[in-house]
Image (tube, rainbow, N blue to C red):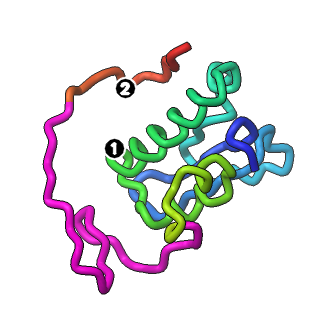
Amino acid sequence: MKVKEAMLVYNPGTDQVTVVPWPDYEHLSRGYLCSELACFRDFKELKKTMQKMVMFVTAYQAIVREEVDPKAMHNAMLSIDEYREHIAPDMQRPLKEKIWMGTWETTREHRCDCHHKRDSGNQGRDFPK
């Protein structure tokens, strides 16, 4: 599905996240507290490049601020064509590994210990034009 037709829905603090078509004629989003992306008129009016950026930022914010499970978010986002176009080839399938404290629990030895301070910034729904 294209990002301009995708509504991301989730329940904060859980692994309950999915992407459904917008408009949601079949009421697939029923039971989810939060909805993002194509359900906002401002999002649909953005240029394609900005829609992609907002898609990634929105997913990241849901993971960090709303405590949505990162693995579940990734797996849901795989249904969006533009998401798959911009992720690494080895991430094109649903992930099964558990995530602990922001690091992947896998057989790999790689671990990123970078910590960056973040400016509070705009947390509203004002999308750049």
Task: Please rate how many residues cluster around mark 1, counting C-alpha atoms within 10 Å: few if below 14, some from 14 to 19, many from 20.
Answer: few
> What residue would you read off at disc 1?
65
Q: In the image, is 122 to the left or to the right of 125?
A: left
Q: In the image, is 25 to the left or to the right of 64?
A: right
Q: Position of residue 50 (x, y in %)?
A: 56, 27
Observer able to see residue 30? no
Q: Can you name the residue that lies furthest to the front here?
A: 89
**Label 1 to label 2: alpha-carbon separation:** 10 Å
Q: Amino acid at mark 1?
A: Arg
Q: Secondary structure at mark 2?
A: loop
Q: Secondary structure at mark 1?
A: loop
Q: Position of residue 35 (x, y in %)?
A: 59, 40
Range covered by the magenta-colored residues = 92-118
Quarter of the image holding residue 14?
bottom left
Q: Nearer the viewer, residue 111 or 100?
A: 111
Magenta-colored stretch includes residue 115: yes
Q: Can you name the residue that lies furthest to the bottom here?
A: 107
Quarter of the image holding residue 48?
top right
Quarter of the figure that contains the C terminus? top right
Q: Residue drawn at (78%, 49%), measured in percent from left and top?
A: 27
Q: Please, what is the dominant secondary structure of the magenta stretch? A: loop
Q: Position of residue 86 (x, y in %)?
A: 54, 50
> What residue would you read off at disc 2?
123
Q: Amino acid at mark 2?
A: Gln
Q: Earlier in the sequence, mark 1 or mark 2?
A: 1
Q: Residue drawn at (26%, 62%), measured in percent from left and top?
A: 102
